[in-house]
Image: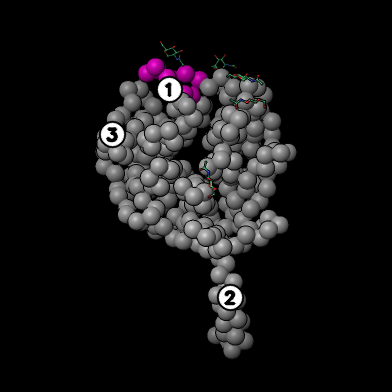
Amino acid sequence: MTAQLLLLLILLAKENTAEHCDVQSEESNKRCFVKQTLATLPHSPNQLAVDKLTNTLYFSFDAGQGEYLPAALQLDTKRLTVLKGVKDAFAIASDEENGEVYFGGSHGIYRYNPVLKTLKRLLVKNLDIWWLVLKKRLYFIRFPSLKAYFYANKSVKGVSNLNNYTVNQFVFDAEDNIFFINGTGLFGIKNNSTSPILLKDNPRFLGMAVDNSSHVYLCSENSIYVISQMVQKVKKIVSVAGVLGIGFDRDNNLIYSDSHELVRLMPVNSKS
Ligand SMILES: *[C@@H]1O[C@H](CO)[C@@H](O)[C@H](O)[C@H]1NC(C)=O
Ligand SMILES: *[C@@H]1O[C@H](CO)[C@@H](O)[C@H](O)[C@H]1NC(C)=O
Ligand SMILES: *[C@@H]1O[C@H](CO)[C@@H](O)[C@H](O)[C@H]1NC(C)=O
Ligand SMILES: *[C@@H]1O[C@H](CO)[C@@H](O)[C@H](O)[C@H]1NC(C)=O
Ligand SMILES: *[C@@H]1O[C@H](CO)[C@@H](O)[C@H](O)[C@H]1NC(C)=O
Ligand SMILES: *[C@@H]1O[C@H](CO)[C@@H](O)[C@H](O)[C@H]1NC(C)=O
């Protein structure tokens, strides 16, 4: 290593410690975050869920047999538990009303009650689940058709305003507007409408989630975005490499996964 390069590295390191800023937001207020590695994983998931009642992060990881094993990480104690009994937890969602967690994959949908530690498989045959959403009802996207459905009265029904659209992921905002991504881009559907509006077709979005106020966040390969409420503009917040999935903890801190770890972005000036 040349002396010059070494000097540069020392200067960079100094600057880092002076600012304590691993990630700086690209908004006008330039918020500063430190990265907190929550877990190191061989292959990490797309959908993350946090049970806000207990501040527990649910995620899954590739255990090597082509199936995803679910795990729970209590974010205050950092206690990590691998849950047994679920075959393939590719998709995960939590029910904010009662803290129950749903897992979906090639063996259908399971409902987990963390308090009673009970696990039930829903009585629907031939379900391969790609994505799960809980908003008063249990919604899901089936694989490989990538069509959206919901579960009610022990039967499966199509989501009428997503009828026959190919949907890779979707969420609801606070007003029950639907936002979805597919191979074409990011679309919004007003709560009682059936016509999707293209919001952005570039970059390619890989994941989406809502924060604790139902604001819609998205990630692309190297950035995280939020949909601003007023004009439905997609705004870049931070650049982070390799993001695959996003979620929010009880205090609304952003958690993301990439191909090898789960990271939480902690605000530097947080008083908590
Ligand atoms: C489920 O069944 C109840 C009672 O039979 C009915 O009132 C309700 O509309 C049904 N829900 C759906 C989504 O079909
Ligand atoms: C959706 O597709 C199914 C099967 O292809 C068809 O029967 C149905 O009419 C379509 N629904 C709408 C709203 O286009
Ligand atoms: C649906 O949108 C309308 C108009 O924006 C709004 O008044 C209404 O509250 C929304 N519905 C729900 C369930 O939020
Ligand atoms: C994505 O959804 C839009 C709106 O429904 C549709 O026009 C488009 O064909 C879809 N793209 C893909 C790749 O399915
Ligand atoms: C949208 O539909 C809901 C019921 O699904 C209804 O209560 C509401 O009034 C509708 N809003 C508009 C703006 O039509
Ligand atoms: C969401 O998080 C923010 C920031 O921590 C907090 O002020 C707010 O009370 C939270 N809201 C809900 C509904 O939990």
Q: Where residue 173 appears, x then y in whole percent?
A: 58, 34
Dot label at residue 18: 2
The front one of 227 and 69 is 227
**Span of residues in magenta:** 149-158
Residue 150 is covered by the magenta coloring: yes
> Local crowd at mark 3 within 10 Å, few (<14), some, or many (≥20)?
some
Residue 175 is covered by the magenta coloring: no
Asked whether, in this view, residue 199 is left or right of residue 183, the answer is right
Q: Residue at x 36, y 51 (%)?
A: 74
Q: Earlier in the sequence, mark 3 or mark 2?
A: 2
Question: Mark 1: which secondary structure?
Answer: strand
Q: Where residue 71 appears, x then y in whole percent?
A: 34, 47
What predominant SS class does the magenta segment belong to? strand
Amino acid of disc 3: Leu
Q: Is residue 182 visible?
A: no
Q: Where residue 252 appears, x then y in whole percent?
A: 52, 48
Q: Earlier in the sequence, mark 2 or mark 1?
A: 2
Residue behind mark 1: 151
Q: Earlier in the sequence, mark 3 or mark 1?
A: 3
Residue 28 higher or lower than 167, as above or below: below
Q: Where residue 183 appears, x then y in whole percent?
A: 60, 37
CB-based contact (under 8 Å), mark 3 and mark 1: no
Mark 1 C-beta to ligand 1 under 8 Å? no
Q: Residue at x 68, y 48 (%)?
A: 235
Residue 149 higher or lower than 233, as above or below: above
> Local crowd at mark 2 within 10 Å, few (<14), some, or many (≥20)?
few
